[in-house]
Image: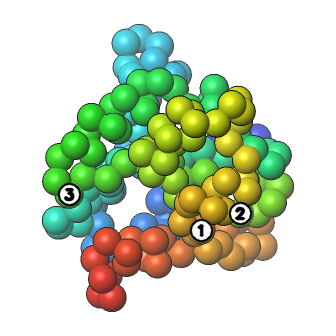
Amino acid sequence: MASNNIGKTFEQEFKECVPPDYYLYRLKDDTSGFYGVSNPCDYILFRSPYLFLVELKTHKGKSIPIAKIRPNQIQGMEKATQYEGVYGGFLINFRELEETYYITVQDVIQFTQTEERKSIPVEWCRDHGVKIEQKKKRVRYSYDLESWLRRYYGKSV
């Protein structure tokens, strides 16, 4: 794992924290739509009866530019979430603040339609997202994904 690719490090940390009873699949991604590949998300996460489309974003600073979220990601996730049991959203990691939030695609759509900003501030994520607790392990992080997923399944995950 190259230390200069923070996004790949975040992906690796995410994969290591997915509970073992979930199916996790990484969609093929050829450089943001180059060669015709244009996926709505990075990962498909499944445990019956729910399917999650998850796009991972890590960003330095206190807000993430909306330009970092591709229109096809919003459109693809919005379309998929029309089906019962399908959820879509963004796992946004604010590196400098050491904070990570899950934001639904519906909340991102609402933000883009009602706010005049060109970036989503961490304050908005704190108010509208689900905070994913994280612990630093020397250099890398572990994320408490079970507490986020428990919201969908009740107490037993």
Mark 2 lies on a secondary structure that is: strand
Q: Amino acid at mark 3?
A: Gly
Residue 148 shows in the view: yes
Q: Residue furthest top?
A: 35
Q: CA distance from mark 1 to mark 3?
A: 21 Å
Q: CA distance from mark 2 to mark 3?
A: 27 Å
Dot label at residue 29: none
| Near-viewer residue (127 or 146) | 127
Q: CA distance from mark 1 to mark 2?
A: 8 Å
Query: In the displayed structure, would residue 152 be above or below residue 118?
Result: below
Residue 28 shows in the view: no
Q: Amino acid at mark 2?
A: Glu
| Near-viewer residue (143 or 106) | 106
Mark 3 lies on a secondary structure that is: loop
Relative image position of residue 68 (x, y in whole percent): 62, 30
Q: Choose mark 2 or mark 3, whichever is in front.
A: 3
Q: Residue at x 22, y 43 (%)?
A: 82
Residue behind mark 1 = 131
In the drawing, does residue 129 fall left or right of residue 40?
right
Q: Residues within 10 Å of mark 2 (few under 14, many from 20)?
A: some
In the drawing, does residue 139 fall left or right of residue 107?
right
The figure's colour scheme reads: rainbow
Pointer 1 or 2: first along the chain: 2
Q: Residue at x 43, y 44 (%)?
A: 105
Query: Which quadrant does the C terminus fall into?
Result: bottom left
Choose top left, top right, bottom left or bottom right for residue 79: top left
Q: Residue at x 45, y 51 (%)?
A: 104
Whether pointer 1 and pointer 2 mark residues with C-beta atoms closer than 8 Å, the reply is yes
Residue behind mark 2 = 99
